[in-house]
Image: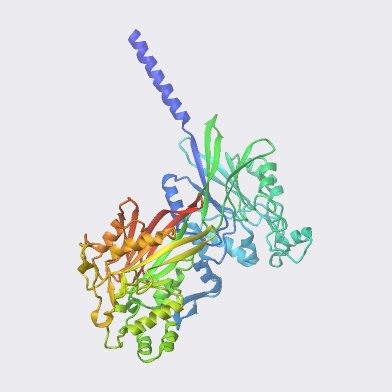
Amino acid sequence: MKIKFIIVASIIFLIVLLTGCQSTKDTEINVLATSDLHSIIPDNLVSYVEEERKYDENLLMVDAGDFFDMQSGEMNKWFTGQKLVRFKDGIPEYKKIAEPREGEVPLAKEMAKLKYDAVTFGNHEFVSNDKQSLDKLVSDFENNNIPLVSANVYKQSGENYVKPYVMKSVQTDKGDVKVGILGLTIKEVGERSRFKNFEEDKKARELGEQEQYKGELYANDLVEDAKKWVKVMEKEKPDVIIAIVHSGEEPKNPKNPGNKIKELATTVDGIDAIVAGHTHEKIEQHTYKNKSGEEVIVTQPGAHGNSISKINFKLDKKNDKWYIKDKYSELKIFGKEVNIITTSGLHQNFSDEMAVSLFNERDRDVQPIFIDTGDFLDTNAKEMTKWSKEWQYNSKKGIHKKINEWPIVYLGYDAVVLGSHELTSDKKNFKEKKSILDSIIENFEEMKIPVLSANIYNESGDNYVKPYIMHKVETREGSIKVGVLGLTVDKDKKDSSDLNSEKDSKTLNTPEKTEELYTNNLVKDAEEWIRVMQKENPDVIVAVVHSDNNMALKNPSSEIKKLAMSVDGIDAIVVGHTKNKIEEHSYKNEFGDKVIVTQSGEDCYSKISLELRKENGKWNVINKYSKSIKMK
């Protein structure tokens, strides 16, 4: 009897224990939010959202307006109806491909990839459209399953222009959670008017006063309409209410008179969280209390997709009703992505397609750095013939004139590395003299394009050209200093494993032509020059290497691999003049730091991307990756 009692008691204890464990597990709802994209959807934003969805299939996503703009390349093409097709004598030429704004807006398809559950209007959606084009924008987004919501924008009849809100049912292990998403838009959508009086200026900026919307649309005060529509929403018994609002936190007269987030949070009951926008500020979380004393959290995810807000709700279910136990928001700030674009062998690969592909790479918030890894000079190539004849017969002035037409110049390269074609003879079409190369280098320098190679020397022991450059990449958070070290692998030199051999460390490139020049071993020189570069406190160091060794990364004793593993301080290496295309190889240097290496291959260009974040006034590399891109 006693044993039976113990067994029953144990079973009851286990049931209670298991029931208790289950009850302590919170149900979570997560919401990602963007604002003020202005048509820019960065790769790291897309990657982050995709990664989050792998772990949370019920993830919701919203946007607080000002998504529509022509700042991205695809949107610019759609706005203008023109496409860049080639460069003629360095001048870009465009081809008409459609009427301006013809067809579906490309942004709708791009945003659909992120699976937005609701998007509200910002002022940009109005000022960049008239009523007819705005109608089409709404239709394009609806066709891509993106609901546009705004509770305080009305047709002249008094009917809502779009849905005021949406209700989303989120499935969980304990039943569905109903999330209401309310859209609200600042009613002062226009730019500052001619009126100096604040009240007159504010009135003139309202939606209903804009010429293209008079008699068509108008907007009410967002706070007053929020009070009305939250009560309507509550009739559907949502468990959570989120407001996505294109408005800043507080007024900053006279610039932003319609910023009413604080007023919304403190005077309207029923809202659990607010996503703000319009002012491009970053707010991780501000907490207010509404009239009923309940907490309302506010977050704002910045602009241009450089950060994203994540709101987390922890819920508990009692008597078939959901209660919010806790809520918070956090800001994921993406690092500034610095891209180094490198080409190789322009004498073989130059084409209109290449020029257009490279030009389109400039379509970024942060401008990339363009480097050529050498072999930009070859008189056998069709595109170079006319220039080589000028070099052969004309004076220095003539050379200067023709250099303006080089793709390296008109595409705005930041530096070039000396390659084998610059250092070898080609008697058939080109009168080989070092003075010609000297002139070309001088002309590049005059065009503000440094020529680099840290391991090529004059007989005097001086560097023949600059060993490296320090390039400042400008961002909204300050400049990032990128050091680019140029290196040239001697095509006639064996892959040296004995760096102590003086015979191996100094080899004449082409005695017939460049008897005044010699190369040192690139690994040995890289070590010395990296130490010099580090005195200038660069945030990133990239080595760009012209190598004739097509097995540069496959050969275990190759100098490229040694460079990656034995020279500390290098973040990434680009290998040029190679037939093998390698997206990315990853190595560890002596300190255990990751060094990535990429080879462009034929008909490709290399792209190294480094993501940096500023912490305590210093830029730190938080991610790095590379790829070899086929020229389109």
**Residue at the outermost bottom position:** 393
**Residue occupying the point 43% across, 62% down:** 482
Image coordinates for residue 617, horizontal then vertical, percent: 51, 52
Residue drawn at the location 59% of the way across and 59% of the way down: 66
Horizontal arrangement in the rendering, residue 453 relative to residue 108 (left or right): left
Q: In the visual, does 171 lie left or right of 379?
A: right
Residue placed most toward the observer, 208 or 426: 426
State whether residue 632 appears in this view: no
Between 134 and 25, which is closer to the camera in this rendering? 25
Percent x, y of residue 546: 31, 70
Q: Is residue 389 above or below residue 471?
A: below
Q: Nearer the viewer, residue 478 or 334?
A: 478
595 horizontally vs 305: left or right: left
Do we see residue 70 in this rendering? yes
For the N terminus, give its image quadrant: top left
> Residue lying furthest top in this view?
1
Residue for point 46% across, 78% down: 447
Q: Residue furthest front?
A: 460
Place of residue 107 in the rendered image (x, y in percent of width and height, measured from the top left): 52, 62
Residue 528's image quarter? bottom left
Colour approach in the figure: rainbow
Q: Position of residue 95 (x, y in %)?
A: 49, 79
**On screen, residue 575 above or below 437:** above
Rendered-image quadrant of the C terminus? bottom left
Count the labels in the image: 0
